[in-house]
Amino acid sequence: MSLWEFANPVKFMALSGKVLPWVIALAVLTLVPGMVWGFFFTPEAVNFGNSVKIIYIHVPSAMMAINIWAMMLVTSLIWIVRRHHVSVRAAKAAALIGVTMTVIALITGAIWGEPMWGTYWAWDPRLTSFLILFLFYLGYMALWAAIEDPDTAADLTSVLCIVGSVFALLSRYAVNFWNQGLHQGASLSVDKEEHVADVYYLPLLLCIAGFVLLFVALVLIRTRTELRLVRLHRLEIRERMKDA
Amino acid sequence: MLELGKYEGAILSSWGVTIALLAALVFVTWRRSVAVKRALETAEKRASDNG
């Protein structure tokens, strides 16, 4: 069996329909305990006090904001190269989730920044590239809404997605590239020496898993809705042609 | 009761905004999914009735 078989909307609908209840259950089973653990059962940090509890929502949402754009890039490239409708509809379906994650990361970052840095906002490389990523998300959704022909909209939004990927990359590596600004480096790393202490790390991992699974569940539901809309649109056109 | 100290405002507002936005996202996704599914079923029934 080839992965490309799932580019067939009928096969995608059948498989996603079977997988979806399990993904939803797993999302609930990771996100709720992760958030409860992080909020209620973690100690104060030496440098951050109790404000460290914001890490359980800020870090996962920021990671998702960048990675959702990366997923949109891959699916947009598949559309450009192989013209698979399911892939570009998945990119469209992911955009609202991505913009929500970006807004959460920006707001929680600003609220956390005030007690830590003495300001809600600074034109720091990571914060600025994140703000631009947010604007790219808005532009991507506006472009889909503004163009009536779905294939033209898919082409143009895919190109926009490729351009915006520069800022998604900058959002991730801005701290390393410029080595300046207020924002700290990564809280998590493959190198165990670099990430936060285990008492914060384990609930953080659970929250990240929860955010990822929530994204998968939502993007499956939204992609299924997009594919139904395509079918609905075709039926309406056929009906109008019959009436004419 | 959980004691959050001097960061209480920052913590509660961050978590409040996050939970509200995630709940809104789930609700919007679910509502649109149900509405489109229903509209498609109606359109398919109409199409099959009309041959």
Image: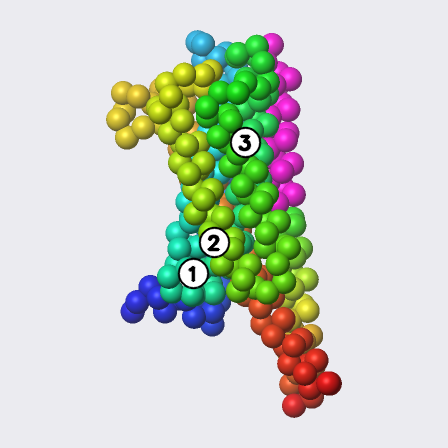
Which residue corresponds to mark 1? A79
Q: Residue at the location (54% across, 24% down)?
A: A109
Q: CA distance from mark 1 to mark 2?
A: 8 Å
The residue at which mark 3 appears reads as A131
Give the number of marks. 3
Closer to the camera, B51 or A53? B51
Quadrant of the rendered image containing residue B22: top right
Comparing A143 with A233, the one in front is A143
Q: Are marks 1 and 2 in contact (CB under 8 Å)?
A: yes
Determine the secondary structure under disc 2: helix
Identified by mark 1, the residue type is Trp
> For the magenta stretch, what is the residue range?
B1-25
Percent across and percent down for residue B46 are 69, 81
Q: How is the image coloured?
A: rainbow
Q: Is residue B26 visible?
A: no
- Is residue A4 shown left or right of residue B15? left
